[in-house]
Image (tube, grey):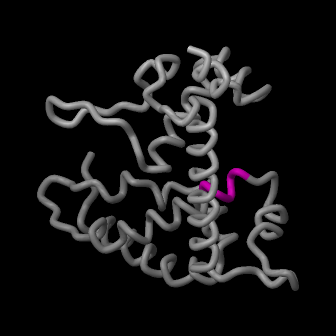
Amino acid sequence: MFPTMHSLWVKLRLLIQLLQCYHCQVNKLCAEWESSNLLCGEFYKRAKGVKTTAWDALRVEWGNWKFIAEEHQHYLDTASFWNAFSDGNGKRFLYQQILNGIAEQRTSAAAQDANNAHTFFGGNLDHPLAQGSFHYAKGSKTYLLSKDDAVAKKWRKILTTWPDISLSATTSSALTVQSSSQ
């Protein structure tokens, strides 16, 4: 069943109201994200015969909401979230400060994970033990990943899917010794 123009208009008006309040009420955003279908991507799908630019207008903001709501889910409770996103005096960060903080944390974590991968494989992501995990294909050529976020993503996948490497990585970063003796 396709939504009617009226139902889309009502939801769009609600979203505009939410957009205005989520900048000030991050707790409300996280609660809505968990318990509502108002913020789900289904709303933004095109309906046959209905021309709407709702998704185009709200795509970036929806992505920001998702960014914050998913980060909130990593904490045990709301108090823990606010403890992480407050200044030294306990004043809660504003919406944009939270977004910036999350981005900085993720960039830092990616850099650390990429460094761990490089260290583990003795500075050589093309190491035979990596089994080509750090390669990607573009056209008919293959390339070695170089960006921290891409290397980190593959490294995290290796750690969750290859128990022997995961165990080695937690006990030592000893491939540098193995690779120099080969």
Residue 51 versus residue 82: which sits nearer the camera?
82
Residue 170 in the image, given as x and y percentages of width and height: 76, 29
Residue depicted at 63% across the width and 28% down the height: 176
Q: Is residue 159 above or below residue 119?
A: above
Q: What secondary structure prevails in the magenta region?
A: helix
Q: Is residue 131 left or right of residue 83?
A: left
Q: Is residue 84 left or right of residue 137?
A: right
Residue 67 versus residue 123: which sits nearer the camera?
123
Q: Is residue 35 magenta?
A: no
Q: Which residues are magenta?
A: 70-74
Displayed quadrant of residue 7: bottom left
Residue depicted at 51% across the width and 84% down the height: 20
Q: Is residue 29 above or below residue 19?
A: above
Displayed quadrant of residue 67: bottom right
Quadrant location, the C terminus:
top right
Residue 147 in the image, given as x and y percentages of width and height: 43, 50
